[in-house]
Each structure stands twice: as C-alpha cells, then as structure tokens.
Amino acid sequence: MNTLTDVAPAFVTMAHQIVWCSVATVDTHGRPRSRILHPIWEWDGNRLVGWIATVPTSPKRAHLDANPFVSLSYWATSQDTCVADCRVTWALDEETRVEVWNRFASAPAPVGYDPSIIPGWDSPQSETFAALRLEPWHLRVFPGSVLMGQGGEVLDWRE
C-alpha cells in the first residue's frame, strides 16, 4: 500500500489529463447511479481535495443526502485509469461557490473552463450553480503501460 504523498500527485496528473469522469452515487433505494462530471483537484502536499461545479438537481441531492459518498472513475484510450472514492459534501454558501467558480475559470485547459458557458450559470450566484467538495478515502492510479506489459506501477492508497 502506498502513502497519500505517493499517490495524490500521480492521481491529479492523470485525472487532469483525462478531465471527464464517471461519478457514481447510490440512490435512496441502494441502487447505483452514474453521471459524467468534470472535477478539479487540489493537492497541497498534505491533503487532496476535489471540486465539482454542478447543478444541484433533486435526484443528486437526495442521493447524497442519503449516502454522502461517490466513486469517480477516469479512463483514457491509452488505457490509463484512475479512481477516487470520496466523501462528498455540498458547498452551497456564496463564498465557496465564488471560490469554485474562480478555480475553474482560472485553471489551465483542459481542466479549466469558463463556467458561464453552462446554460443558466451567469455567475457563481446563479440559482442552478452549486459546488461539491470531494475528500478521498481511496485512490488508485493504473497506468495503461502496466496493462499493456510495458512497465510502470499501479499506485493504491486508502485511509
């Protein structure tokens, strides 16, 4: 088992290259539900936190209220994959929404983008704009080179 310090930088690099991931929640009946989302990750050398700008739809809110955990899975055609299993919390206060909006707006492409391109998101104060905070308890980074027998290392960390 690796340490968070070993895995987090490799995870952020791969996740930010792939950009889009499948995010699974559990509905109120215990069934999985997946959607495609676009997180941004921050590694400060000690702690990894992810953010998702999203619409706080009723199903998503109900799922996360009942079970505040998600699983994020990234995949690229190179067969690179990485996974983050996280505790998730809604960030609905104005200060955090502005911070998350600016985080996406100022990040380099392909992770960064102008959130106002999303219909209904005129500003961080838009009623349909919310943020999700991701705190991983498990990370896995699996380079496609390992799968193809070309070397590399699978990295895995759990709290």
Image (cartoon, helix red, strand yellow):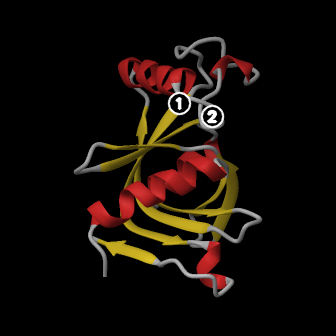
Q: Residues within 10 Å of mark 1 (few under 14, many from 20)?
A: many
Vertical relation: 32 (above or below) 40: below
Q: Quadrant of residue 151?
A: bottom right
Q: Quadrant of residue 99?
A: top left
For the residue marked with disc 1, what is the amino acid? Answer: Ala
- Please report whichever mark, 1 or 2, sits nearer to the chain's N-terminal start: 2
Vertical relation: 158 (above or below) 56: below
| Residue 136 appears anywhere in the view | no
Q: Secondary structure at mark 2?
A: loop
For the residue marked with disc 2, what is the amino acid? Answer: Val
Count the marks.
2
Drawn side of residue 5 relative to residue 38, left or right: left
Q: Residues within 10 Å of mark 2 (few under 14, many from 20)?
A: some
The N terminus lies in which quarter of the figure? bottom left
Vertical relation: 13 (above or below) 7: above
Residue at numbered disc 1: 130
Drawn side of residue 87 relative to residue 113, left or right: left
Residue at numbered disc 2: 55
